[in-house]
Amino acid sequence: YQFVRSAVDGYEKHLQYVFENLDNDVDCEKDISTDGVIDVASFASEQGTITTTENTEAKFIIDPFANIHPSPEKCIATHKLLSPQTLSRAVRALTRCKLDTPIMSQRIRDIERLVGKIGWTPITDDLSYRLLEANGKAGNVRRTLALLELRRKRGYPPREQLSPLTLSYSGDESNNSDFTVGPGEKEFIHAINSIQSAQLPLRRSRNIYLHESSLSESSLDNPTRYLDAILVNMSQRGVPLTSSMAARMLNCYASTGRTGKALHYFYKVVRDPVEKDGTYIPGPQPTHLGKEDLQEWKIARKKEGVARMLTPADEDGETVGQVTAADDGVSNVSDDVVGEVNSSEFEGSYGDMSKRANQRTKVRMIMHPPPPFHKIPSAVKNAPLIQNRDQRPFSFEGSSGISPSSTNFSPTSSSIHQMNPYDRKPKSMTKLEWELEREWSLSLTAAFAFADSLTHGACGHSPIELDVVGWNSLIKACCYRGAFHRALKILNDTMPAKGIQPDSFSYNTVLAGLARVGDTENLRNILISMTNKNVPIDKYTVQAMVDGLLNMGDVSGASSMVQDIFNQHDTLPPYTTHLKIIEFALSNGLIFEAKRHVYFIQQLWKWQPSQHHSDEFCQLVSATKKNPKLSKDALQKLFRYFGEDLLDEDFF
């Protein structure tokens, strides 16, 4: 990709050179319009610089590039540089540079402005399509919609009319979320992609403490108006609306990241100091004490038998531990919600032991209190809930609160106290009814309203019925907004009533959402339901189950879950899940649980396929066995990082 980037950079530098040395006598500078790159055919005619033949070919009479170079060959090369074909190829190359979305957005706009100021590149069918594709990937929504309207006004036919394609949206066939590309839909897919690209900041770093109404319009938390514009353009150009396109549009409502109602901070990772002789005292240390008082506290703890010796340091007394977020001196290494990462929680270049400011430290995990009861669907079920007028958290009817540390969510819990009789009587509804309210999530309400409009015919299109992919998009939107009862209602009632059977992606989406609030009861019930209905269980199913159990501190149950599903359903989670189980066990001091999962990994090393195993499963096990992150050396290094030993005697 470096070669492609350098080529695009060189093209942009040449454009800048041409613009700086352009003949000033010919007023070519003109800002880029809202209809696309400036159409120089009409502009140049006004300047008297070109004439148009029957074949609409422009013949230059006055050469504005004489100041650039006196050589005619250089002038011809400049004409070719500014031709629509060259610009089209440059824009297409830019889309394949693998640039970050904000950077790509700026690059494509800079090139467009520069070409527009030069003013000698007429827009064509192919050029407008390539600009549409590039702006779609860059997240320039308004620009993409303007190019769609330009193509409609000029009568350019929609692309891919005669070559239907099938593109996988998720890249995983087991999710059954393939979107088909029908005739003429390709450029409208680019427009939809522009919305999802513009929503990237929300997916990456959404402020979960900020209410939806506080988000700016540019964040596209509610993309309805832009989707309606795409539908109108499709209708005007004779492209019918299909279930696949409807599913793509509905997926825009689930591309803005999870809100605070769908998340909970279950744990944080801290670093405790270790003495120079390798003595470690578990738990937080009273750093507010003076040096002498702190030393007396350490001596007292050692006499109580609390301290223990860790893996000794190197001969030079230093270690080379490295972790992703702790080397900046911050004590809280990670305030992860569910540990959903693309790599291991503590993944980095594991050293002999973690280190901060040249001092050995012990990585330890602190578990937070469980989520409030109203976030956990199995804790609420169909019980009526109330919410005070000041929008405080939900409580059971007849009460105003519940102890956050109470594990008994019954309305008769002793932690419940009576409401103030002078308060206005709040509404009493079930959690599902609260989630159906407009105030629960404006974006979610808009998603269902948009889906309902599609089934009745929207923007000149014929009514359609949502398929399983469309309903999966709505389930995903519900889970991202914390409306788990609504998602379960769609999964268990709405889809079967319409004759649509939920697939693995439907169940995995709900499982991943429930794992983020630690609803282990519903996790197990859904897994049983999948087994009874013969729904395939894949690696994402196992990953969601393990995440939910680990979030609630059940390390033993998570390790057993992986082993049971491997034995009963012939599937394994991603390799990061194995590392996550070991890391949770080590950071919580459960050394034998960590070694128990290491024994399971060793069993995978010695596993041999039989005639009853599928080729896909054999490839999965083989990839897990050969993964360097799960090798003997890597596991021993991981244990040393946490200050523990994994000896050769612990291996088969």
Image (spheres, rainbow, N blue to C red):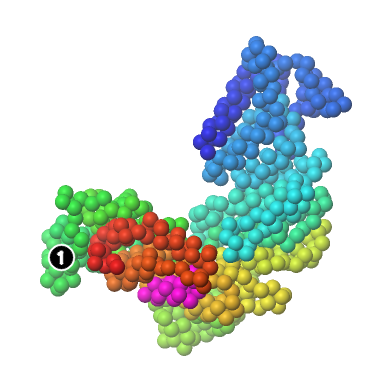
- Residue found at the very far bottom of the displayed protein: 412
Residue 153: give x, y in percent of width and height.
81, 41
Q: Is residue 25 above or below residue 646?
A: above
Residue at image location 54% in from the left, 75% down from the top: 388
**The one of 119 and 243 positioned closer to us in this rendering:** 243
Q: Quadrant of the C terminus?
A: bottom left
Q: Is residue 646 above or below residue 83?
A: below
Residue 148: give x, y in percent of width and height.
74, 45
Name which quarter of the figure residue 441 lies in. Answer: bottom right
Q: How many marks?
A: 1
Residue at image location 51% in from the left, 56% down from the top: 206
- Residue found at the very far front of the displayed protein: 611
The residue carrying pointer 1 sits among few (fewer than 14), some (14 to 19) or many (20 or more) residues within 10 Å by Cα, namely many
Residue 361: give x, y in percent of width and height.
25, 58
The answer to whether residue 310 of the structure is visible from this angle is: yes
The residue to which callout 1 is attached is 298
Q: In the drawing, does residue 301 fall left or right of residue 169?
A: left
The answer to whether residue 589 of the structure is visible from this angle is: no
Name which quarter of the figure residue 27 lies in. Answer: top right
Q: Label 1's element?
A: helix
Residue at image location 23% in from the left, 51% down from the top: 319
Q: Main secondary structure of the magenta part?
A: helix
Q: In the drawing, does residue 151 fall left or right of residue 411?
A: right
In magenta stretch: residue 568: yes
In magenta stretch: residue 179: no
Q: In the drawing, does residue 455 fall left or right of residue 631?
A: right
Magenta span of residues: 556-571
**The one of 412 and 111 positioned closer to us in this rendering:** 111
Q: Is residue 48 above or below residue 563?
A: above
Residue 402: give x, y in percent of width and height.
45, 79
Mark 1 is on which residue type?
Answer: Lys
